[in-house]
Amino acid sequence: MIGPSAYVQIWMGACYDPCMKNISGVKNSSVALSWPCPNATSSADLCMLSEACGFSGSVPNPKVGGTLDQNPAPNQWYRFIIPISLHSGFIDIGFNQLMQLTVGADMDRMIGIWRYTVTYFASGIFGFVMGGNYAAQLEPSDSCSGCLFGILTLYLLDLLCNWSQRQSPWVELIIMVLGVSFVVGLLADLDNFSHICGFTMGLAIGLTTMRFPNSLRGRIGLARQPYVAMTGGAGQAGAPEKPEDHLLHGLYQGQRRSGIIVRW
Protein backbone atom coordinates (compact mmCIF):
# COMPACT_ATOMS: atom_id res chain seq x y z
CA MET A 1 0.00 0.00 0.00
CA ILE A 2 3.10 2.26 0.23
CA GLY A 3 2.38 3.49 3.74
CA PRO A 4 3.16 3.01 7.45
CA SER A 5 3.81 -0.40 8.94
CA ALA A 6 1.04 -2.39 10.58
CA TYR A 7 2.43 -1.62 14.03
CA VAL A 8 2.38 2.12 13.40
CA GLN A 9 -1.25 1.78 12.32
CA ILE A 10 -2.04 -0.13 15.54
CA TRP A 11 -0.41 2.58 17.63
CA MET A 12 -2.37 5.28 15.78
CA GLY A 13 -5.73 3.60 16.40
CA ALA A 14 -6.41 0.90 13.80
CA CYS A 15 -9.04 -1.73 14.61
CA TYR A 16 -6.92 -4.39 16.34
CA ASP A 17 -8.58 -7.05 18.49
CA PRO A 18 -5.86 -7.55 21.18
CA CYS A 19 -6.24 -3.86 22.07
CA MET A 20 -10.03 -4.18 22.34
CA LYS A 21 -10.82 -7.50 24.05
CA ASN A 22 -9.27 -10.69 25.46
CA ILE A 23 -8.00 -12.84 22.59
CA SER A 24 -7.26 -16.55 22.67
CA GLY A 25 -3.57 -17.11 22.04
CA VAL A 26 -2.68 -13.74 23.52
CA LYS A 27 -4.22 -13.56 26.98
CA ASN A 28 -3.78 -17.30 27.66
CA SER A 29 -0.39 -17.69 26.00
CA SER A 30 2.08 -20.02 27.70
CA VAL A 31 5.05 -17.85 26.66
CA ALA A 32 5.80 -14.16 27.02
CA LEU A 33 4.64 -12.19 23.99
CA SER A 34 6.03 -8.98 22.53
CA TRP A 35 5.28 -6.74 19.57
CA PRO A 36 7.55 -4.61 17.35
CA CYS A 37 7.61 -1.06 18.64
CA PRO A 38 5.84 1.47 16.40
CA ASN A 39 8.95 3.65 16.26
CA ALA A 40 11.34 0.73 15.76
CA THR A 41 13.82 0.68 12.90
CA SER A 42 14.76 -2.99 13.36
CA SER A 43 13.07 -6.21 14.45
CA ALA A 44 15.13 -6.21 17.64
CA ASP A 45 13.10 -3.34 19.14
CA LEU A 46 10.21 -5.02 20.94
CA CYS A 47 7.42 -3.60 23.11
CA MET A 48 4.72 -4.92 25.38
CA LEU A 49 1.09 -4.89 24.28
CA SER A 50 0.28 -1.76 26.30
CA GLU A 51 3.02 0.15 24.46
CA ALA A 52 2.04 -1.23 21.05
CA CYS A 53 -1.60 -0.21 21.55
CA GLY A 54 -0.67 3.30 22.66
CA PHE A 55 -3.19 5.78 24.08
CA SER A 56 -1.36 6.13 27.43
CA GLY A 57 -0.92 2.39 27.92
CA SER A 58 -4.54 1.74 28.86
CA VAL A 59 -4.35 -1.92 27.72
CA PRO A 60 -3.13 -4.41 30.36
CA ASN A 61 -0.26 -6.65 29.30
CA PRO A 62 -1.05 -10.38 28.94
CA LYS A 63 0.23 -12.67 31.68
CA VAL A 64 2.04 -15.92 30.97
CA GLY A 65 -0.42 -18.75 31.55
CA GLY A 66 -3.30 -16.30 31.95
CA THR A 67 -6.95 -16.85 31.08
CA LEU A 68 -9.53 -15.25 28.80
CA ASP A 69 -11.29 -13.99 31.93
CA GLN A 70 -8.40 -11.67 32.83
CA ASN A 71 -9.55 -8.38 34.35
CA PRO A 72 -9.32 -5.60 33.53
CA ALA A 73 -9.76 -6.59 29.89
CA PRO A 74 -8.62 -4.44 26.96
CA ASN A 75 -11.41 -1.98 26.17
CA GLN A 76 -10.28 0.48 23.51
CA TRP A 77 -13.78 0.61 21.99
CA TYR A 78 -12.96 3.83 20.14
CA ARG A 79 -10.98 1.73 17.66
CA PHE A 80 -14.33 1.14 15.95
CA ILE A 81 -14.43 4.87 15.08
CA ILE A 82 -10.84 6.12 14.73
CA PRO A 83 -9.92 3.77 11.81
CA ILE A 84 -12.37 5.62 9.58
CA SER A 85 -9.85 8.48 9.40
CA LEU A 86 -6.78 6.22 9.00
CA HIS A 87 -5.46 4.63 5.82
CA SER A 88 -2.90 1.92 5.16
CA GLY A 89 -1.06 3.79 2.41
CA PHE A 90 -1.13 6.11 -0.59
CA ILE A 91 -2.99 3.65 -2.82
CA ASP A 92 -5.72 3.20 -0.22
CA ILE A 93 -6.24 6.89 0.50
CA GLY A 94 -5.96 7.81 -3.18
CA PHE A 95 -8.68 5.39 -4.24
CA ASN A 96 -10.93 6.45 -1.37
CA GLN A 97 -10.46 10.14 -2.17
CA LEU A 98 -11.39 9.45 -5.78
CA MET A 99 -14.61 7.79 -4.61
CA GLN A 100 -15.33 10.61 -2.16
CA LEU A 101 -14.97 13.32 -4.80
CA THR A 102 -17.04 11.55 -7.46
CA VAL A 103 -19.80 9.21 -6.31
CA GLY A 104 -19.71 10.54 -2.74
CA ALA A 105 -20.00 14.20 -3.72
CA ASP A 106 -22.83 13.51 -6.16
CA MET A 107 -24.78 11.49 -3.61
CA ASP A 108 -24.27 14.23 -1.01
CA ARG A 109 -25.82 16.77 -3.36
CA MET A 110 -28.75 14.50 -4.08
CA ILE A 111 -29.81 13.32 -0.60
CA GLY A 112 -28.43 16.11 1.60
CA ILE A 113 -25.62 16.35 4.13
CA TRP A 114 -27.49 14.78 7.06
CA ARG A 115 -28.59 11.60 5.30
CA TYR A 116 -25.12 11.30 3.83
CA THR A 117 -23.38 11.79 7.19
CA VAL A 118 -25.56 9.27 9.03
CA THR A 119 -25.07 6.66 6.31
CA TYR A 120 -21.33 7.31 6.06
CA PHE A 121 -20.45 6.93 9.74
CA ALA A 122 -23.00 4.22 10.54
CA SER A 123 -21.69 2.07 7.68
CA GLY A 124 -18.07 2.58 8.71
CA ILE A 125 -18.62 1.87 12.41
CA PHE A 126 -20.83 -1.17 11.79
CA GLY A 127 -18.27 -2.50 9.33
CA PHE A 128 -15.47 -2.33 11.92
CA VAL A 129 -17.71 -3.83 14.62
CA MET A 130 -18.39 -6.87 12.46
CA GLY A 131 -14.81 -7.02 11.20
CA GLY A 132 -13.53 -6.93 14.76
CA ASN A 133 -15.67 -9.97 15.59
CA TYR A 134 -15.24 -12.12 12.48
CA ALA A 135 -12.09 -11.02 10.61
CA ALA A 136 -8.55 -12.17 11.39
CA GLN A 137 -7.95 -11.29 15.04
CA LEU A 138 -4.27 -10.40 14.75
CA GLU A 139 -4.53 -8.26 11.62
CA PRO A 140 -5.05 -4.48 12.01
CA SER A 141 -7.79 -2.91 9.93
CA ASP A 142 -8.44 0.71 8.95
CA SER A 143 -9.66 2.89 6.05
CA CYS A 144 -13.02 4.47 5.22
CA SER A 145 -13.80 1.82 2.60
CA GLY A 146 -16.70 0.49 4.69
CA CYS A 147 -18.21 3.98 4.76
CA LEU A 148 -17.92 4.28 1.00
CA PHE A 149 -19.54 0.91 0.45
CA GLY A 150 -22.51 2.23 2.42
CA ILE A 151 -22.66 5.27 0.15
CA LEU A 152 -22.26 3.00 -2.86
CA THR A 153 -25.36 1.14 -1.69
CA LEU A 154 -27.37 4.36 -1.85
CA TYR A 155 -26.26 4.80 -5.44
CA LEU A 156 -27.28 1.21 -6.20
CA LEU A 157 -30.75 1.84 -4.72
CA ASP A 158 -31.10 5.04 -6.73
CA LEU A 159 -30.08 3.17 -9.88
CA LEU A 160 -32.57 0.35 -9.29
CA CYS A 161 -35.42 2.72 -8.39
CA ASN A 162 -34.89 4.76 -11.56
CA TRP A 163 -33.74 1.96 -13.86
CA SER A 164 -36.11 2.76 -16.72
CA GLN A 165 -35.12 6.45 -16.71
CA ARG A 166 -31.39 5.88 -17.07
CA GLN A 167 -29.77 5.99 -20.48
CA SER A 168 -27.34 3.13 -19.80
CA PRO A 169 -28.30 1.45 -16.51
CA TRP A 170 -26.40 -1.76 -17.27
CA VAL A 171 -23.21 0.19 -17.96
CA GLU A 172 -23.51 2.02 -14.64
CA LEU A 173 -24.17 -1.24 -12.80
CA ILE A 174 -21.16 -2.96 -14.38
CA ILE A 175 -18.91 0.01 -13.58
CA MET A 176 -20.06 -0.04 -9.97
CA VAL A 177 -19.72 -3.80 -9.47
CA LEU A 178 -16.53 -4.47 -11.43
CA GLY A 179 -14.80 -1.11 -11.41
CA VAL A 180 -15.36 -0.37 -7.73
CA SER A 181 -16.44 -3.32 -5.58
CA PHE A 182 -14.35 -6.00 -7.29
CA VAL A 183 -11.19 -3.89 -7.53
CA VAL A 184 -11.40 -2.65 -3.93
CA GLY A 185 -11.96 -6.20 -2.68
CA LEU A 186 -8.73 -7.36 -4.33
CA LEU A 187 -6.52 -4.71 -2.72
CA ALA A 188 -4.13 -6.02 -0.09
CA ASP A 189 -4.51 -5.46 3.66
CA LEU A 190 -8.20 -4.54 3.46
CA ASP A 191 -10.95 -6.00 5.63
CA ASN A 192 -13.64 -7.45 3.37
CA PHE A 193 -15.90 -8.02 6.39
CA SER A 194 -15.89 -4.25 6.84
CA HIS A 195 -16.85 -3.80 3.18
CA ILE A 196 -19.69 -6.34 3.30
CA CYS A 197 -21.14 -5.06 6.56
CA GLY A 198 -20.76 -1.42 5.49
CA PHE A 199 -22.71 -2.31 2.36
CA THR A 200 -25.37 -4.03 4.50
CA MET A 201 -25.77 -1.03 6.81
CA GLY A 202 -25.99 1.31 3.82
CA LEU A 203 -28.74 -0.91 2.41
CA ALA A 204 -30.70 -0.79 5.67
CA ILE A 205 -30.43 3.00 5.94
CA GLY A 206 -31.13 3.51 2.25
CA LEU A 207 -34.32 1.46 2.35
CA THR A 208 -35.63 3.67 5.17
CA THR A 209 -34.53 7.08 3.90
CA MET A 210 -34.38 6.97 0.09
CA ARG A 211 -37.34 8.03 -2.02
CA PHE A 212 -39.72 5.59 -3.69
CA PRO A 213 -39.33 5.03 -7.45
CA ASN A 214 -40.71 7.89 -9.54
CA SER A 215 -43.22 5.54 -11.17
CA LEU A 216 -44.78 4.86 -7.76
CA ARG A 217 -44.47 8.45 -6.57
CA GLY A 218 -46.29 9.63 -9.70
CA ARG A 219 -49.34 7.62 -8.73
CA ILE A 220 -49.61 9.40 -5.39
CA GLY A 221 -48.71 12.87 -6.70
CA LEU A 222 -45.16 13.12 -5.36
CA ALA A 223 -43.12 12.67 -8.52
CA ARG A 224 -40.12 15.00 -9.01
CA GLN A 225 -40.38 16.41 -5.49
CA PRO A 226 -37.05 17.04 -3.69
CA TYR A 227 -36.18 15.75 -0.26
CA VAL A 228 -37.92 17.52 2.63
CA ALA A 229 -36.00 20.06 4.69
CA MET A 230 -35.22 19.27 8.34
CA THR A 231 -37.28 22.30 9.41
CA GLY A 232 -40.42 20.49 8.26
CA GLY A 233 -41.13 22.65 5.23
CA ALA A 234 -40.94 21.39 1.69
CA GLY A 235 -37.71 21.99 -0.15
CA GLN A 236 -37.60 24.19 -3.21
CA ALA A 237 -38.43 22.42 -6.42
CA GLY A 238 -35.70 22.48 -9.02
CA ALA A 239 -35.53 22.06 -12.76
CA PRO A 240 -36.65 18.72 -14.25
CA GLU A 241 -34.02 16.04 -14.14
CA LYS A 242 -32.09 15.23 -17.28
CA PRO A 243 -30.28 11.97 -18.02
CA GLU A 244 -26.92 13.67 -17.76
CA ASP A 245 -27.77 14.87 -14.25
CA HIS A 246 -27.52 11.37 -12.77
CA LEU A 247 -24.50 9.97 -10.98
CA LEU A 248 -21.52 9.10 -13.18
CA HIS A 249 -22.70 11.80 -15.64
CA GLY A 250 -21.30 14.89 -13.93
CA LEU A 251 -22.42 17.01 -11.02
CA TYR A 252 -25.96 16.69 -9.77
CA GLN A 253 -27.92 19.71 -11.05
CA GLY A 254 -31.50 18.66 -10.51
CA GLN A 255 -32.12 20.68 -7.32
CA ARG A 256 -30.32 24.00 -7.22
CA ARG A 257 -30.90 26.28 -4.24
CA SER A 258 -30.47 30.01 -4.00
CA GLY A 259 -29.82 29.88 -0.26
CA ILE A 260 -28.46 27.43 2.28
CA ILE A 261 -30.99 24.87 3.49
CA VAL A 262 -30.27 22.28 6.15
CA ARG A 263 -31.87 19.21 4.63
CA TRP A 264 -32.77 15.79 5.95
Image (cartoon, rainbow, N blue to C red):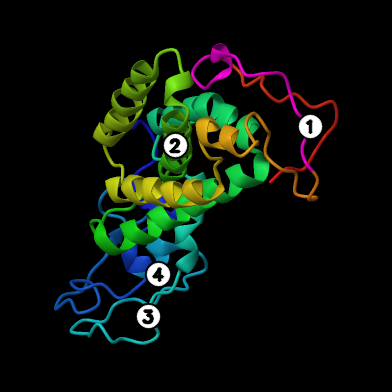
Callout 3 touching callout 4 (CB < 8 Å): no
Q: Which residue is mark 3?
A: 73
**Callout 2 secondary element:** helix
Which residue is the extreme one toward the right? Answer: 259
The amino acid marked with disc number 3 is Ala
Task: Determine whether 176 is above or below 167 in the image.
Answer: below
In percent of width and height, residue 58 lies at 47, 73
Return the disc, 2 or 1, that comes first in the chain's sequence.
Answer: 2
Q: Residues within 10 Å of mark 2 (few under 14, many from 20)?
A: some
Q: Which numbered mark, 3 or 1, is in the foreground of this view?
A: 1
Q: 63 or 232, which is in the foreground?
A: 232
Task: Determine whether 64 is above or below 171 in the image.
Answer: below
Return the disc, 2 or 3, that comes first in the chain's sequence.
Answer: 3
Question: Distance between the Cα atoms at labels 1 and 4?
Answer: 55 Å
Q: Which residue is mark 4?
A: 50
Q: 145 or 138, which is in the foreground?
A: 145
**Callout 4 secondary element:** helix
Quadrant of the image occupied by residue 250: top right
Q: Which residues are magenta?
A: 234-249
